[in-house]
Image (cartoon, grey):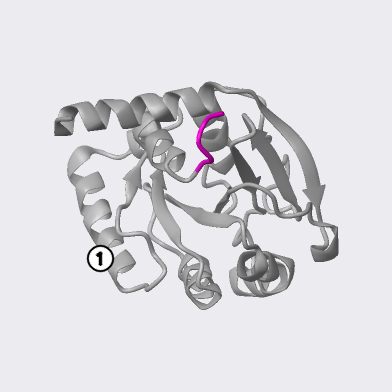
Amino acid sequence: MTQEEEAAAALEAGRLLFAAECRFFFAAQQLEKLPPPAGPEVAFAGRSNVGKSSLVNALTGRRGLARASNTPGRTRQLNFFDLGGRLTLVDMPGYGYAQAERRVKEDWQGLMFEFLRGRPTLRRVVLLLDARIELKDSDTAVMDLLDRAAVTYQLVLTKADAVKPPALQSKLESVQALARKHPAAFPHVAITSSDTGLGIEALRAELATLADPPA
């Protein structure tokens, strides 16, 4: 198989996975009330208003699947979605909306950190960063926390359609350099736009490599 054929096959695998039914099945606010570990899981994390719900909806092609809170930073629970019985998507609470350092400490040193550290089925955390703005202290604090939890995470730039190409390239290079300094960071940084679909197919293909094989 040629490189082009392999790339096409990967995109098709991603398309098929995310074309499957995706349904909400569990929400947890306490560690002891998490659903039992089963198949592979991918968690989505990021600052409030980074576009996390929009990305989950764009990946699954379902506009109302993940819903953003009317009050940013208010969601305090883990929401679990089953994707075709092959992969579980976990929507994590946003962080850093206000009083960033305290919020990260309170929300993420408790339930979130224990979930990240102790979940044997968690394959990867997708950590979203807004391509339009500079990284915040809360972002680097969560990256440090993920390093300590020894959880592989991938940085994904969102809202890339709102950034001109030269500035986007500069942003990508700086984030890639940052990723290389973190031991648990996945080396490839993805660029996405939920509005235009930029990078969505490629991210689907990457996440499909973590799913259980089709029946």
Closer-to-camera residue (77/69):
77
In this view, 104 is above or below 62: below
Residue positioned 58% across, 23% down in the render: 20
**Main SS category, magenta section:** loop
What residue sits right under mark 1 in the picture?
A: 177
The x, y position of residue 73, in whole percent, is 68, 54
Coordinates of residue 178 in the picture (x, y in percent): 31, 67
Q: Is residue 29 visible?
A: yes
- The quadrant the C terminus occupies is top right
Front-most of residues 87 and 135: 87
Q: Secondary structure at mark 1?
A: helix
Mark 1, residues whose alpha carbon is within 10 Å: few (<14), some, or many (≥20)? few
The residue furthest front is 215
Q: Is residue 93 left or right of residue 134?
A: right
199 lies above or below 28? above
Answer with the quarter of the image where residue 65 lies: top right
Q: Amino acid at mark 1?
A: Ala
Instruction: Find the magenta span and give its range.
Output: 211-215
Residue 138 horizontal side relative to residue 114, left or right: left
Depth order, front residue of 201/136? 201
Where is 112 relative to 192, above or below? below
Q: Is residue 212 magenta?
A: yes
Residue 91 at x, y percent in the picture: 64, 46
- Residue displayed at 55% across by 34% down: 54
Q: Compare residues 95 and 89 and report the one nearer the observer.
A: 89
